[in-house]
């Protein structure tokens, strides 16, 4: 006969210890479930987090490179300004015109005018809206300086053509460039954009007209060298001089050494 006192008792649903164990197990399961959810959320948002970090880093680097480029340009360190400006070119989705614009401006300061022109023309293609205003002014100034250099080299035709190109760049300036908003976006806040444009246009017109009105220099004919007498003629001329000298001496002897003056020979 089995002793009923040794048999296991069935769990009492109302036992406090059992309720605590069940609550702890439920809490652990819930925590594990939340950790899994947080892990999947972290994995899923990792690309967005990296993109956000890249975005912030790019913005900060753009401002850093731009500040460095401007500081170097003001200090006449055009090579340093160019190097810093080229750092703006990497993944520049926001202001793609800025890198070639700053590079072209630095090259112009270093008197590398053809290279500066190429960079500024690229910047003009990438610019939009009010961004084109300051790009056009700098491009026209570079073309003007190229025209001045051609004129100094005596190539009036090339100078007139460059002045005409600079004038076209200036006259095609959008009307919005006359606004206060365009002035605020200028790369040189101390420069009056409207006044600079007007002065540049007047100056280019005068230079172009001056080159077009200057007549081309006539080529001077080369002087032909005088023919040199041959040796035979030189000997013949020497004989005649010697003969004339002998005849003069004979005439003086016949006159008896008179006190009259000599005849001119």
Image (cartoon, rainbow, N blue to C red):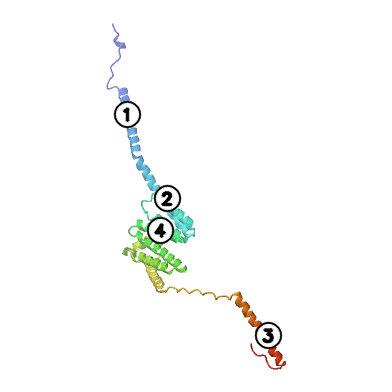
Which residue corresponds to the image point at 32% horizontal and 24% vertical from the top-left? 21
Q: Secondary structure at mark 3?
A: helix
Q: Nearer the viewer, residue 125 or 200?
A: 125
Instruction: Compute the Cα span from label 3 to label 2.
Output: 103 Å
Q: Residues within 10 Å of mark 2 (few under 14, many from 20)?
A: some
Q: Nearer the viewer, residue 132 or 13?
A: 132
Mark closest to the chain's N terminus, 3 or 4: 4
Label 3–label 4 contact, CB within 8 A? no
Of circles 3 and 2, which is in front? 3
Q: Nearer the viewer, residue 249 or 160?
A: 249
Image position, residue 51 (x, y; %): 36, 44
Q: Is residue 26 above or below residue 107?
A: above
Label 4–label 2 contact, CB within 8 A? no
Q: Which residue is mark 1?
A: 29
Instruction: Compute the Cα span from label 4 to label 2.
Output: 25 Å
Residue 61: numbered disc? 2
Image position, residue 250 (x, y; %): 69, 88
Mark closest to the chain's N terminus, 3 or 2: 2
Residue 4: name its quadrant.
Answer: top left
Q: Which residue is mark 3?
A: 246
Mark closest to the chain's N terminus, 2 or 1: 1
Instruction: Compute the Cα span from label 2 to label 1.
Output: 46 Å
Of circles 1 and 3, which is in front? 3
Q: Residues within 10 Å of mark 1 (few under 14, many from 20)?
A: few
Instruction: Compute the Cα span from label 3 to label 4.
Output: 84 Å
Of circles 1 and 4, which is in front? 4
Mark closest to the chain's N terminus, 1 or 3: 1
Instruction: Compute the Cα span from label 1 to label 4.
Output: 67 Å
Which residue corresponds to the image point at 35% horizontal and 41% vertical from the top-left? 47
Mark closest to the chain's N terminus, 1 or 4: 1
Q: Which quadrant is home to the N terminus?
A: top left
Label 1–label 3 contact, CB within 8 A? no
């Amino acid at each position: 006969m089995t002793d009923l006192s040794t048999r296991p008792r069935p769990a009492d649903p109302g036992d406090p210890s059992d309720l605590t164990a069940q609550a702890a197990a439920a809490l652990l399961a819930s925590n594990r479930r939340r950790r899994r959810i947080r892990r999947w959320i972290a994995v899923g948002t990792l690309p967005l987090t990296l993109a956000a970090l890249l975005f912030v880093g790019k913005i900060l680097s753009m401002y850093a490179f731009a500040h460095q480029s401007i500081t170097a340009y003001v200090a006449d360190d055009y090579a340093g300004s160019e190097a810093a400006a080229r750092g703006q070119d990497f993944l520049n989705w926001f202001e793609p015109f800025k890198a070639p614009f700053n590079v072209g401006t630095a090259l112009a300061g270093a008197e590398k005018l053809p290279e500066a022109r190429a960079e500024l023309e690229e910047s003009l293609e990438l610019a939009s809206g009010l961004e084109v205003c300051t790009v056009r002014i700098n491009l026209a100034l570079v073309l003007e300086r190229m025209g001045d250099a051609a004129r100094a080299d005596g190539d009036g035709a090339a100078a007139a053509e460059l002045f005409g190109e600079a004038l076209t760049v200036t006259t095609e300036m959008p009307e919005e460039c006359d606004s206060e908003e365009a002035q605020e976006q200028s790369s040189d806040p101390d420069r009056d954009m409207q006044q600079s444009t007007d002065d540049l246009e007047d100056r280019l017109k005068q230079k172009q007209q001056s080159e077009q009105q200057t007549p081309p220099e006539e080529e001077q004919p080369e002087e032909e060298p005088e023919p040199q007498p041959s040796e035979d003629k030189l000997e013949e001329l020497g004989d005649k001089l010697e003969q004339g000298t002998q005849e003069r001496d004979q005439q003086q002897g016949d006159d008896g050494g008179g006190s009259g003056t000599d005849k001119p020979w």
